[in-house]
Amino acid sequence: MRTNTIQCGRHTLSLERSLIMGVLNVTPDSFSDGGLFLDAGRAVEQARRLVDEGADLIDVGGESSRPGSDAVSEEDELKRVGPVIESLAAKLDVPISIDTYKPATADRCLALGATMLNDITGLRDAAMREVAARHDVPTVIMHMQGEPKTMQAEPSYGDVVSEVKDFLGQRARDAEAAGVRQVIIDPGIGFGKTVAHNMTLLKRLAEFNDLPYPLLVGVSRKSSIGAITGAPVDDRLPGTLAATAIAVLNGANMVRVHDVKECKQAVQIVEAIRKA
């Protein structure tokens, strides 16, 4: 049975409504906001703004995962995110998630006050499973075909929904076997998928409700929106709102977004319609 709460340290997040995860990229090269919040002070200011606009939690990342991006070292990643995580944990009254696939970065950031782990590689590394279990934090397991550098080079599936669903189910069970008590799954919109794959996942998202794990979806400003509409990355809010609304309508328990205020309104309307 799917849980109805997520426990992030002292914070209990209810899944009676869809939660808003605000994106905070502390990177020079993220696809939509790279370089804007490298300074720790500006990052904290942006996080405060996201919380004021309605974010239930903040997801902090120090390495871009856009298609074609290069990996960064654990040392460089931690230099970017460590001070921000520590400051946010002390100054904000919402959970802080660390978006990383590197065990040393995760371990240090969880010690500094992060209370959720978001791994785009789906806990591929056994050391990450150990870190997540030892810190006893909710952990997002995402599906990605390939690596960020090459993931958009002709991604291929038989049935994208069933393959992604099977992958997430198996990785979640592996995590639980390693001692991870709270698993959240993410189909990885835009990660090793074509536009058609992404639209199919959103259309059939309700099929993931067969798995006993909360469902996180991130569609904010994704390239699929640009491919369909022709809109540049800084003009994809309307498409983001539509895709986010569909995700919530089809069962997403949490949405990861850049534009918190606008997406929160969209989510509120969807939920009001569902309850009518």
Image (cartoon, grey):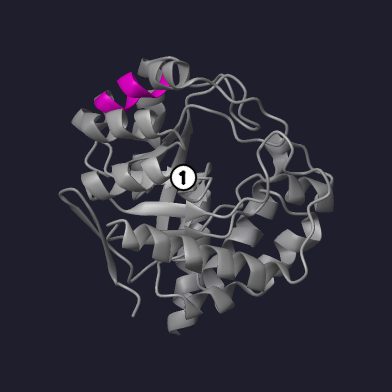
Quick check: 9 left or right of 42? left
Q: Position of residue 220 (x, y in %)?
A: 60, 48
Name the residue located 62 percent from the left edge and 50 percent from the top edge: 144
33 in relation to 148, above or below: above
Quick check: 40 left or right of 12? right
93 in relation to 262, above or below: above
Q: Nearer the viewer, residue 164 or 231?
A: 164
Q: Does the magenta-highlighted stretch encompass residue 84? A: yes
Q: Amino acid at mark 1?
A: Asp
185 in relation to 34, above or below: below
* Mark 1 burial class by Cα count in 10 Å: few <14, some 14-19, many 20+: many
Q: Main secondary structure of the magenta part?
A: helix
Q: In the current view of this chain or complex, which residue is farthest to the left?
A: 10
Label 1, on which residue? 119
Range of magenta residues: 80-86
Q: Position of residue 47 (x, y in %)?
A: 37, 33
Name the residue located 53 percent from the left edge and 43 percent from the top edge: 259
Let me know if residue 63 appears in the view: yes
- Image quadrant occupied by the N terminus: bottom left
Quick check: 31 left or right of 170? right
Q: Position of residue 18 (x, y in %)?
A: 41, 64
80 in relation to 256, above or below: above
Which secondary structure lies at badge 1? strand
Name the residue located 71 percent from the left edge and 40 percent from the top edge: 235
Q: Quadrant of residue 43?
A: top left
Q: Does the magenta-highlighted stretch encompass residue 207? A: no
